[in-house]
Amino acid sequence: MSSVLIALGGNVGDVRATFQKAIAHICGMAQAALIARSSDYATPPWGDEDQAPFINACIEIETSLDPHALLFVMQKVEQKFGRTRDKERRWGPRTLDLDMIAYDDVSMQKPDLTLPHPRLFERAFVLVPLAEVAPDRVIAGIRVHDGLASVSTQGIERLPDTG
């Protein structure tokens, strides 16, 4: 089994309910075990700032799928919740965004998948929830907790549990 870190984001619709359903779909379709789930965080939009705030979270799963098979599952789950990658603007509003952050210690650069995620250590909206589930995980030679210490977390707010 491989340990995989996945970032979730969205700012259209009931994002927190979407996360719950999407995580269940990922685990079911990937025959994966959910190892950890972060809190949800309200985060300022990134890249294209003229839009609603996002909600972000991270999960850790264990799966026997290879990275490309898991990517296929993740893209199917995004589509199920209304995401159409080819019709949206870059960094624009979305119902669900799933990013594979790390897959064990795999390092790869393919047109459709780069591991670990190339912009992980620039993005507080990923690092804050990721540090909650895997603070001591070393990705690309950097401990998650240390990577978080090097970015501004201004405007990121932990949301209360949904109950």
Image: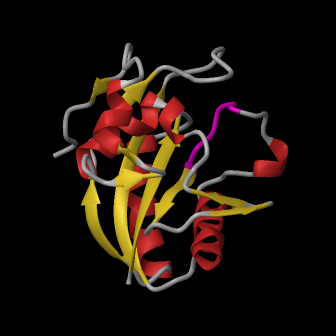
Q: Residue at x 76, y 34 (%)?
A: 90
Residue at the right extreme of this rendering: 86
Please state the horizontal and vertical placement of residue 43, each as a whole percent of the image: 43, 25
Residue 68 versus residue 133 in the image, above or below: below
Residue 98 versus residue 46 in the image, above or below: below
Residue 48 in sight from this viewpoint: yes
Q: Which stretch appears magenta? A: 91-97
Please state the horizontal and vertical placement of residue 1, each as a whole percent of the image: 38, 84
Residue 41 in sight from this viewpoint: no
Q: Residue at x 66, y 72 (%)?
A: 72
Query: Does the magenta run of residues contain 33?
Result: no
Residue 92 versus residue 108 in the image, above or below: above
Query: Does the magenta run of residues contain 96?
Result: yes
Total marks in image: 0
Please state the horizontal and vertical placement of residue 59, each as a whole percent of the image: 36, 57
User: Which secondary structure dominates the residues rendered in magenta?
Assistant: loop
Please state the horizontal and vertical placement of residue 107, each as a whole percent of the image: 58, 64
* Rendered image quadrant of residue 124: top left
* Rendered image quadrant of residue 88: top right
Q: Residue at x 59, y 56 (%)?
A: 81
85 sits left or right of 14 in the view: right
| Towards the viewer: 139 or 37 | 139
| Towards the viewer: 112 or 116 | 116
Q: Residue at x 61, y 45 (%)?
A: 118
Which color scheme does this rendered protein use? Answer: secondary structure
